[in-house]
Image (cartoon, rainbow, N blue to C red):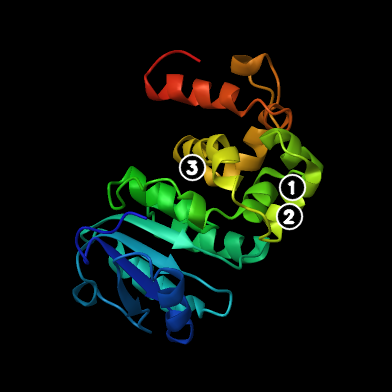
Amino acid sequence: MGTITNSQELIVWAEKGTLAEARDTFSRFDASFLAIPSAASKKDIPASKVSLFYLREAEPKAEVESILKAIKGHKTSFVVLYTPHHSPEFAFRMGKMVGKHSLDSADWAFNLRHVEQLLRARNVLAHRAHKTADAFDIVAARKRLGLTQEQMANALNVATRTLQNWESGVGTSQMPKKTQDLRELLGLMDDYVIAPRERAWLDTPLPAVQNRRPADVISGGKLRDLIVEFQRLREGQPV
């Protein structure tokens, strides 16, 4: 995980009751943490490259609206509104509030991978190294791709029983080698597929892979086909 180069490049705002939770969530980031004040003015807001709001449905509307109003036109180049436990009604209500204050530089994120993408795009986070084999969570990877155990086993060219053992932490000596392409592909997806649209991307036929769905390419054991297309994209070649 890359880190913030300056502690004032990222400020995480949270309501007092969720400040500890926000600190825990963003403990991997070099960030400053501040409680959302009940009333805020421009002088109360330190300059930062990015202000991230950790929002929960219990948060009083007046407190959030106060600081959004104060932050408009302030020395903050980008605002991220992170709602980890959102509901459609809450997102709609907050969206209206943001629109009211014309925060054109604001963006929404509903999971940490999307937060990381937004920060890296603005050079707040360095592009992180891909996870090492030791840190790789194969269960999370399978669920992220929406695959059954049988499909994941086929993708990795191993027996279903082998995959089941790996997911149980048994007999994993060959897992680093067998998951190398998978880990590379997931890292490329982190860089090129916007997190909220990842499910749609997996289910959409792509001309670059003979109009197959990425999910089918993966479950068919052809991970390298997608990796090659991402590499061509990285090199500026048509895909």
Instruction: Using a 10 Å C-alpha cutoff, classify the residue at mark 3 as few (fewer than 14 neighbours), some (14 to 19) or many (20 or more).
Output: some
Residue displayed at 59% across by 21% down:
225
Q: Of the two numbered discs 2 and 3 on the same chain, state the one appearing first in sequence.
A: 2
What type is the residue that disc 3 sits on? Answer: Asp
Q: Give the secondary structure at mark 3.
A: helix
Label 2: how many residues lie within 10 Å, few (<14), some (14-19) or many (20+)?
few
Q: Which mark is residue 131?
A: none
Q: Which residue is mark 2?
A: 165
Q: In the shown orientation, is residue 84 left or right of residue 33?
A: right
Q: Nearer the viewer, mark 3 or mark 1?
A: 1
User: Mark 1 or mark 3, which is nearer the start of the sequence?
Assistant: 1
Residue 190 - label: 3
Whole-percent x and y of residue 205?
Answer: 69, 23
Residue at the image position 66 percent from the left and 29 percent from the top: 214
Q: Name the one closer to the observer, 43 or 55.
A: 55
Q: Cβ–Cβ below 8 Å for labels 1 and 2?
A: yes
Marks 1/2: CA–CA distance: 5 Å
Disc 1 marks which amino acid?
Answer: Thr
Mark 2 to mark 3: distance in Å? 27 Å
Residue at image x 66%, y 37%?
200
**Viewer-side label of 2, 3:** 2
Q: Secondary structure at mark 1?
A: helix
* The quarter of the displayed image where residue 33 is located: bottom left
- Tell me, yes or no, if residue 105 can be seen here: no
Residue 42 figure quarter: bottom left
